[in-house]
Image: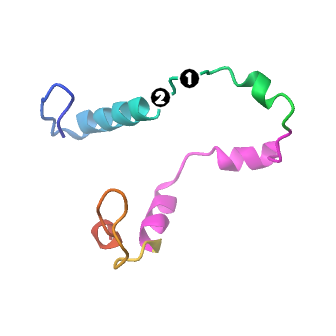
Amino acid sequence: MTDSNGVEHTRENAISKLAIAYFEDLFKSSGNTDWGEFFDDCHSPIMPVMNVVLTADVTNEEVLNAIKSIGGDRAPGPDGLSGAFYH
């Protein structure tokens, strides 16, 4: 994987850091970050017990099940790769 300076990285640790940095930058908000007033009148339908499950770390088993659920002959996704690639 090549970083923004054109330096190629092949070590797994370095590639992981590059991927994290890329997506953090991609999804970084450039707008207002004070949402308190916006949500003041909203009541969450999510109960605390439900939130524990929803915010838990994703397990390897969940990732594997998601990959297996992709049809191998389905049309490619936004990344251009079909389910067969991931199988």
Residue at 62% across / 21% down in the picture? 33
The region drawn magenta spans 43-68
- On residue 76, the disc is none
Is residue 65 shown above or below 63? below
Front position in the image: 22 or 14: 22
Q: Nearer the viewer, residue 58 or 75?
A: 75
Q: Residues within 10 Å of mark 1 (few under 14, many from 20)?
A: few
Residue 57 belongs to magenta span: yes
Residue, x 46% and y 59% (percent of image)?
63
Measuring from the top left, give residue 36's x and y in whole percent: 75, 23
Type of the residue with mark 1? Gly
Q: Position of residue 4 (x, y in %)?
A: 21, 28
Task: Specify the label residue 31 is tagged with.
Answer: 1
Image coordinates for residue 9, horizontal then vertical, percent: 16, 35
Taking the magenta stretch, the answer to whether it contains residue 42 is no
Q: Position of residue 60 (x, y in %)?
A: 46, 56
Name the residue carrying label 2: 28
Q: Residue furthest front?
A: 31
Question: In the figure, 57 relative to 21: above or below?
Answer: below
Q: Which SS type dominates the magenta stretch?
A: helix
Type of amino acid at the residue the image marks with label 2: Lys
Question: Which residue: 76% across, 28% down?
Answer: 38
Q: Relative to 11, say whether 78 is above or below.
A: below
